[in-house]
């Protein structure tokens, strides 16, 4: 009968669901890599999974919040002893998971700088472990709050603590869901990259004093991942691979489509 325990369970369960969904989407994405059916690979599969997960989390947060507000007016019967035992078990599980993730994160090392893909993968690997570790710590905090609510109701008769903690849990779930939705939605609609990223691309291409960008588009394709389309004019143009090599310094740029035009004697006009 404890809403605080329900919120704690959903908080843990939604994170487990999100991690499981991300793992499944990553597996499917790897399988379709190189397939002619997906022009840029399976990036959007992972993004779509994250967006769906965010919608589910938001619905759960709203549902728990409404139930918690109702419980303030109509108290529920709670088996405090059993509920506290379950909350303690949840805390133990979270602490064990945190210890495992902390060890895994500490043992992960980036790959050598000479391998661009491996190096980027190493950073993503560390980031994913770190994000999962923080989520588990947040789960542990909600378990502690649930235990506190059970203790308050069992020993001091503070029944209002249960819906209060449930409301806090609902807000935490809702806030996390909105963050997931905001980030994944930007990738789904091909939102423009931050101006600093486009400026970095421009600086790398135009840094030789000859090449100029006649057209540039940089957009988001995944979490922290971007693609670009560039049209370059130059008096002494280089192969597209040459300009692509310059862009390797932009870690977040996963794909670039580059076209190069020779405009001898007209470069000055193109700069305008």
Image (cartoon, rainbow, N blue to C red):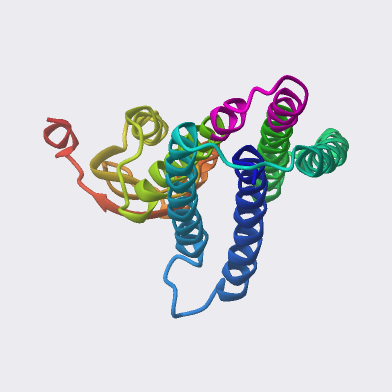
- Observer-nearest of 268 and 29: 29
Is residue 54 visible in the rendered image? The answer is: yes
Residue 164 sits inside the magenta stretch: yes
Question: Can you give x and y, in whole percent of width and height, for residue 255 in the image?
Answer: 46, 54
Q: Quadrant of residue 131?
A: top right
Q: Quadrant of residue 166?
A: top right
Q: Up-down: is 234 above or below 37? A: above
Please tell me which residue is depicted at 84% across the width and 33% down the height of the picture: 106
Question: Can you give x and y, in whole percent of width and height, for residue 53 in the image?
Answer: 50, 55
Question: Can you give x and y, in whole percent of width and height, for residue 265 in the image?
Answer: 16, 39
Q: Main secondary structure of the magenta part?
A: helix
Question: Can you give x and y, in whole percent of width and height, for residue 189 in the image?
Answer: 30, 53
The residue furthest bottom is: 36
**Mark count:** 0
- Image quadrant containing the C terminus: top left
Is residue 184 rendered to the left or right of residue 154?
left
Please tell me which residue is depicted at 26% across the width and 40% down the height of the picture: 213
- Observer-nearest of 91 and 176: 91
Give the residues in magenta.
146-166
Is residue 34 rendered to the left or right of residue 94?
left
Please tell me which residue is depicted at 56% across the width and 71% down the height of the picture: 33
Is residue 24 rendered to the left or right of residue 136?
left
- Observer-nearest of 235 and 65: 65
């Amino acid at each position: 009968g404890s809403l605080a325990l329900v919120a704690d369970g959903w908080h843990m369960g939604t994170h487990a669901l999100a991690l499981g969904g991300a793992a499944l989407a990553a597996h499917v994405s790897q399988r379709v890599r190189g397939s002619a059916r997906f022009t840029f690979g399976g990036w959007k599969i992972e993004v779509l999974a994250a967006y769906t997960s965010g919608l589910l989390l938001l619905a759960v947060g709203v549902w728990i919040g409404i139930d918690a507000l109702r419980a303030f007016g109509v108290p529920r019967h709670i088996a405090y002893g059993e509920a506290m035992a379950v909350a303690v078990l949840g805390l133990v599980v979270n602490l064990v998971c945190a210890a495992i993730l902390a060890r895994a994160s500490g043992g992960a090392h980036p790959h050598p700088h000479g391998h661009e893909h491996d190096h980027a993968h190493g950073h993503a690997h560390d980031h994913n472990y770190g994000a999962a570790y923080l989520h588990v710590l947040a789960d542990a905090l909600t378990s502690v709050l649930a235990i506190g609510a059970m203790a308050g109701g069992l020993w001091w008769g503070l029944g209002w603590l249960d819906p209060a903690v449930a409301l806090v849990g609902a807000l935490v779930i809702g806030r996390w869901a909105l963050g997931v939705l905001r980030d994944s939605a930007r990738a789904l609609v091909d939102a423009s990259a931050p101006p600093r990223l486009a400026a970095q691309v421009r600086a790398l291409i135009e840094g030789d004093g000859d090449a100029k960008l006649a057209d540039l588009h940089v957009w988001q394709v995944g979490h922290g991942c971007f693609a670009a389309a560039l049209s370059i004019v130059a008096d002494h143009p280089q192969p597209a691979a040459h300009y692509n090599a310059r862009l390797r310094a932009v870690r977040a740029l996963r794909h670039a489509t580059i076209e190069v035009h020779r405009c001898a004697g007209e470069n000055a006009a193109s700069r305008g």
